[in-house]
Amino acid sequence: MSSEMMAERQTQMMIEMLDLTEQQVLNVARINTQYGKEMTTLRKSARWNREEIRSGMNELRIRKDEVMQTVLTDDQYKKYKESQRNRKHKRIKSDHRRN
């Protein structure tokens, strides 16, 4: 899936979950697209170094969250972070089942 498609999917999920205003939709779409492209670039540039990718992705997520916090209300940001934690837990559980 392309970074643009991922950004669109993330934005749509956030629209439904957070009841975004029109201005927030525009800002969130721009942020998701920007950071999606940066993550894709990182994956390509650090192709064979997992630790470099992991570290870079973590840094990008932190920066993205800081920007999202300026766009979302306090309640929306709490829901956004909770959703991220839930997805992470599901991913970890899924990974454990495979092993």
Image (cartoon, rainbow, N blue to C red):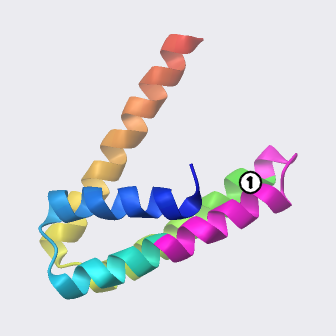
Pinpoint residue 47: horizontal percent, then vertical percent: 84, 51
Q: Quarter-wise, where is residue 22 in the image?
A: bottom left
**In this image, 60 relative to 52: left or right?**
left
Q: Secondary structure at mark 1?
A: helix
Pinpoint residue 81: horizontal percent, then vertical percent: 30, 58
Whether residue 15 is visible = yes
Which residues, given as a range, are shown in magenta? 33-51
Q: Is residue 97 above or below residue 3?
A: above
Pinpoint residue 85: horizontal percent, then vertical percent: 34, 46
Pinpoint residue 50: horizontal percent, then vertical percent: 79, 45
Q: Residues within 10 Å of mark 1 (few under 14, many from 20)?
A: some
Q: Can residue 38 be found in the magenta stretch?
A: yes
**In this image, 68 relative to 54: left or right?**
left
Which residue is under mark 1? 53
Q: Is residue 28 above or below residue 79?
A: below
Residue type at the position of mark 1: Ile
Whether residue 66 is visible = no
Which residue corresponds to the image point at 11% horizontal and 68% vertical from the top-left? 19
The prevailing secondary structure element of the residues shown in magenta is helix
Q: Looking at the picture, tell me which residue is in the foreground, 2 or 10.
A: 2
Q: Is residue 99 above or below residue 63?
A: above
Q: Is residue 66 above or below residue 18?
A: below
